[in-house]
Image (cartoon, rainbow, N blue to C red):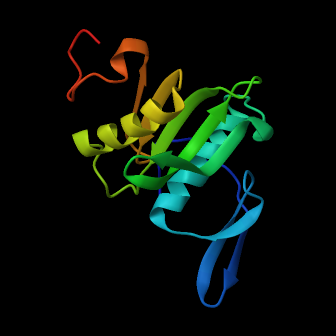
Amino acid sequence: MQLNLPQYSFKYRENENRLEIFCLVRKKWLVLTPEEWVRQHVLVHLVEACKFSVMSIGSEVTIDLPIGKVRADVVIYNKDGSVKGIIECKSPMVNLSEEVVHQVNKYHQALHADWVGITNGNSHLFLKGEHILQEWPLAEDA
């Protein structure tokens, strides 16, 4: 499945008739779903192209919200442990909608990230500062 991200090399294996991909952040094999395909591309892109340390990245990070526990797809930490960024990954077949923006904004409200992003592997939206909690769609001058 082609994405609007650079092509990277991954480790694959078949396990019980399911294709799995090795996660460089979680250091384990995961079932290769369309969403996982996007998440793994984002993780490798953060390390290889953006030069973040693997140690500064969390994947499937549990967050306690008033509605219960949720998991953020990707969380990037500063050296002091504060949150630099949060990225929510969706399957390439999922449109980036107001609902997805609200989802990542809930994570931001709990973690206080410098920026947030959403991607389906083909479309990407990153928001920083005052634009993080802005209503969808973004103003033209944003």
Pick whichever, 108 or 90, lies toward us: 108
Instruction: Please determine whether, in this image, residue 31 is positioned above or below residue 101.
Output: below
* Number of marks present in the image shown: 0
Outermost residue to the top: 141
Quarter that holds the C terminus: top left
Q: Quadrant of residue 12?
A: bottom right
- Where does the image place residue 133, in percent across and percent down from the top left? 32, 24
Instruction: Please determine whether, in this image, residue 45 is positioned above or below residue 128.
Output: below
- Where does the image place residue 140, in percent across and percent down from the top left? 21, 14
| Residue 95 as seen in the image, left or right of residue 12 | left
Residue occupying image coordinates x 79% and y 39%? 55
Instruction: Please determine whether, in this image, residue 44 is positioned above or below residue 16.
Output: above
Residue occupying image coordinates x 46% and y 44%? 88
- Where does the image place residue 116, in percent across and percent down from the top left? 46, 30
| Residue 92 as seen in the image, left or right of residue 85 | left
Residue occupying image coordinates x 28% and y 49%? 95
- Where does the image place residue 108, in percent across and percent down from the top left? 45, 32
Pick whichever, 54 or 1, lies toward us: 54
